Image: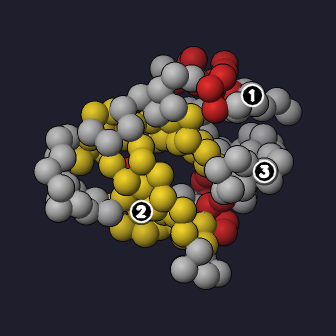
Amino acid sequence: MLQRLREASGVPFNTALANLYRDGRDSVAWHSDDEPELGAHPVIASLSLGATRRFLMRRKADHRHRRAFQLSHGSLLWMAGSTQEHWQHCLPKTARPVAARINLTFRAIGPYGVVGSGTPSSRLGLPESRVIPAGGPASAGVRSRSR
Ligand SMILES: O=C(O)CCC(=O)C(=O)O
Ligand SMILES: [Mn+2]
């Protein structure tokens, strides 16, 4: 999986973090993936497995400015460029009965250049971030990135 992602994206992902959400009571609070070891413009590829959950993003400068995504089984959420600098994200609790969900976030830890700084445009209206459905990048119009 890591190897396929590296080849398809050109990003030298070298780490995967796993989260298990047992049901709707498990959640992740607002945060940015902006740890120093991820570098200035981290690229994060987040694979969802299992139950569909709602994923929210909000602008740091204006918390009313929000985006919501349904992360379904097999989808890949791509966050790059200045996403972590300007946005926070969370996975809220839900009262709906939901089955378990596993999330794997692939990250590139260490210096690897400016591969993350992409063109600030997206048909989702969220610069440099998008959800790639289980069908693959072709259906979402995602370009692979190169240095
Ligand atoms: O489960 C998710 O989709 C988000 C997880 C997340 O934000 C993280 O691990 O940093
Ligand atoms: Mn995160």
**Helix, strand, or loop for circle 1?**
loop
The image position of residue 130, as x and y in percent, is 61, 45
Q: Nearer the viewer, mark 2 or mark 3?
A: 3
Question: Are the residues flagged by discs 2 and 3 in contact, CB closer than 8 Å?
Answer: no
Which residue is depicted at the point 32% across and 63% down?
92
Identity, as a three-letter code, of the amino acid under mark 3: Ser
Q: Is residue 115 above or below residue 23?
A: above
Identity, as a three-letter code, of the amino acid under mark 2: Cys
Which residue bears the numbered disc 1?
Answer: 144
Identity, as a three-letter code, of the amino acid under mark 1: Ser
Q: Nearer the viewer, mark 1 or mark 3?
A: 3
Q: Is residue 3 above or below residue 105?
A: above
Q: CA distance from mark 1 to mark 2?
A: 26 Å
Which residue bears the numbered disc 2?
Answer: 90
Mark 1 or mark 2: whose residue is earlier in sequence:
2
Q: CA distance from mark 2 to mark 3?
A: 22 Å
The image position of residue 58, as x and y in percent, is 54, 70
Which residue bears the numbered disc 3?
Answer: 121
Asked whether the viewer can see residue 18, the reply is no
Which residue is depicted at the point 60% across and 53% down?
37
- Badge 2: how crowded within 10 Å, few (<14), some, or many (20+)? some
Q: Is mark 2 within 8 Å of ligand 1?
A: yes
The image position of residue 70, as x and y in percent, is 42, 48
Name the foreground residue: 51 vs 38.
Answer: 51
